[in-house]
Image: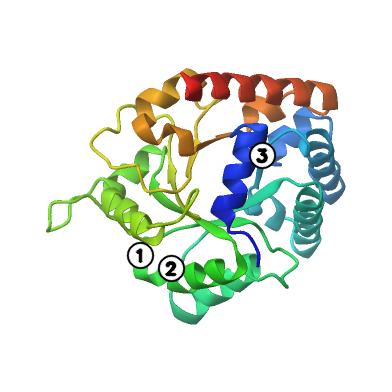
Amino acid sequence: MTLSFGTRLRSAMDERGPLCVGIDPHASLLSSWGLNDDVAGLERFSRTVVEALADTVAVFKPQAAFFERFGSRGVAVLEQTVADARAAGTLVVMDAKRGDIGSTMAAYAETFLHEDSPLFSDALTVSPYLGYGSLAPAVELARASGAGLFVLALTSNPEGAEVQRAVREDGRTIGATMLAHLAEENAGAAPMGSFGAVVGATLGDLSSFDLDINGPLLAPGIGAQGAEAADLPRVFGTAVRNVVPNVSRGVLRHGPDAAALRESAFRFAAEIREAVAA
C-alpha cells in the first residue's frame, strides 16, 4: 500500500528539514540567470534547480502557470521537472490552485493526482471558494492515490482578507471554516494528515485561528516577502512543527550557480530548524 502524503511528508521534514523551495521561472528570474524567456531557458532553469537541490530539500513547489504560459512545450518541461524531482526523492507540491465543481474539479484532480498522469504530484494546491464541498473529487482521489492537498485558507496577499476574514452567520470566519474542514479530514491520522492549509508566514499573530489541524501548513512568505524563520513560532504557535515554509526568490536569486543555490537552501533550512526547535 502507498504511504500517505502526510506520512511521507513527515518523514522528509524530519530527515531533511521542512524547507520547501518554489520553482518559479518567471521572466525576470530567467533574465537574471542569463537565460532567454523561452522554452529552452525554462528547461535549463528547471533542470538546474532540481539537480542542485533534489537531495537537499524536502519539497519542491513548481508554479504551474510559469510553465503553462509556453503552451504544450512548457507543460512538457513541467512534466519532466516533476518526474525528475520525484525520481530524486523530493516531494512535489504542484502549485496550480485549481478550483471548480463537479466533473471539472474531477478532471483537475485527475490531471495532478491520478497516478497514471504525467503530471502526477505528491500534493496539489486548491482553491475552496466555490465551497469546500466542491473539492470532494480532489479529496477522494488524493486519498485513493496517497497524495495530499493544500487548501487556500489564510493567504498572504492583502486581497485575500476580504474573503478569508469574512464572518459567516455562525460567527466563524471563512478561513477558520476551511481550517475546521481540514481538521475533520485529518482526524485520527498519524503521524500527520495529508490535507493541509496554505497560511501566510507574513500574517503576524494568528492565535485567533485554530491551526492545529493535524496536517501540514504550507507557509509562503519567508525571504523576499519579508518574513523570517524566527517569526514562525510567533505566527503558528503550537502548530509550528507542521509548518512547511516555502522560499522561492530567496533561494532562486542565487542561481544559476548550483553551489550558491545549495548554500542558500542549507542556510534557510538551518534557520528554520533552529526556529522550529526553539
User: Which residue reaches farthest bottom?
Assistant: 103
Q: Look at discs 1 and 3 and give the one toward the viewer.
A: 3
Question: What numbered label is drawn on residue 233?
Answer: none
Question: What numbered label is drawn on residue 132?
Answer: 1
Q: Say which residue appears at 61% left-offset and 68% top-offset.
A: 145
Q: Is residue 225 above or below residue 175?
A: above
**C-alpha separation, residue under disc 1 versus residue under disc 3:** 28 Å
Q: Is residue 206 above or below residue 108?
A: above
**C-alpha separation, residue under disc 1 versus residue under disc 2:** 6 Å
Left or right of residue 106, residue 159 in this image: left
Display coloring: rainbow
Q: Secondary structure at mark 3?
A: loop
Number of callouts in the render? 3
Question: Of residues 28 and 208, which is closer to you in this image?
Answer: 208
The image shows residue 114 at horizontal and vertical percentages of 65, 71
Q: Are marks 1 and 2 in contact (CB under 8 Å)?
A: yes
Q: Quadrant of residue 254?
A: top right
Question: Of residues 187 and 237, which is closer to you in this image?
Answer: 187
The image shows residue 115 at horizontal and vertical percentages of 69, 70
Q: Quadrant of residue 135?
A: bottom left
Q: Which residue is mark 2?
A: 135
For mark 2, does the 10 Å Cα neighbourhood hold few (<14), some (14 to 19), or many (20 or more) residues?
many
For mark 3, does the 10 Å Cα neighbourhood hold few (<14), some (14 to 19), or many (20 or more) residues?
many
Q: Are marks 1 and 3 in contact (CB under 8 Å)?
A: no
Kind of residue at badge 2: Leu
Q: Which residue is mark 3?
A: 58
Q: Quadrant of residue 246?
A: top right
Q: Secondary structure at mark 1?
A: helix
